[in-house]
Amino acid sequence: MAKASDLKRGMVIDINGVPHIVKHIDVKSPSSRGANTLYKIRFNNLQTGQKLDESLKGDDFFKDVDLVRAKVQFSYIDGENYIFMNSEDYSQYTLGRDELDDQTEFLIEGLEGIVALLIDDTILGIELPSSVNLEILETPPAIKGATASGRTKTARLSTGVEIQVPEYLETGEIIKVNTETRKFMSRA
């Protein structure tokens, strides 16, 4: 049993008999004495993909889901389906584009460090590594002397996602991107 105050992003819990993954947690601490800390949590239903927003007290309990976390590698795209291969026994799992939601923006062929969430050998979803290395395909030209300024510009990366990067970066460079915040971290 997990308390709402112990929940972390990526944990899977049981809500009304259906597995849900914790996507976002917002903690609200009221200023009045004796008031309980509230946790606004966004869950995703792992079977239907629907979002569920809940406001909970810290001592609300949830039942844990018995699932297996397997290391997988992204193999290839087959139409609307994304194929992942188990790193240990080489079995393959398929997830549709709609089941992956916005995670497709960070999937590149051969990407390792992905964790598949499995119940009875059925894949429910994936957890991406904390960062991925992507190439800048298109960005305005670098500005001379821009290394000291904190200004940014838009860059389109090899997977099609657009993020803000520092002005000194150029087309063709490989950068490290945080998959959770969707922000530039450093050069790779």
Image (cartoon, grey):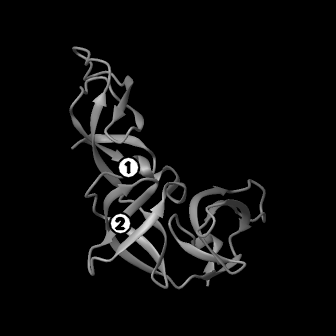
Residue at figure coordinates x 52%, y 63% from the top left: 9
Which of the two labelled residues, at mark 2 and mark 1, occupies the earlier sequence position? 2
Q: What amino acid type should be assigned to the residue bearing mark 1?
A: Phe
Label 2, on which residue?
Answer: 84
For label 1, the crowd category at 10 Å Cα-Cα, with few meaning under 14, some 14 to 19 and many 20 or more, is many
In the image, residue 92 lies at what x, y percent?
A: 35, 73
Which image quadrant is residue 53 in?
bottom right
Residue at the top extreme, as displayed: 144
Mark 2 vs mark 1, foreground winner is 2
Q: Is mark 1 on a helix, strand or loop?
A: helix
Amino acid type, residue under disc 2 in the picture: Phe
Q: Which residue is drawn at 26% across and 79% down?
A: 88
Image x and y of residue 130, in percent:
36, 56
**Quarter of the figure with the N terminus:** bottom right
**Residue that label 1 marks:** 106
Q: Which residue is drawn at 28% across and 54% down?
A: 109
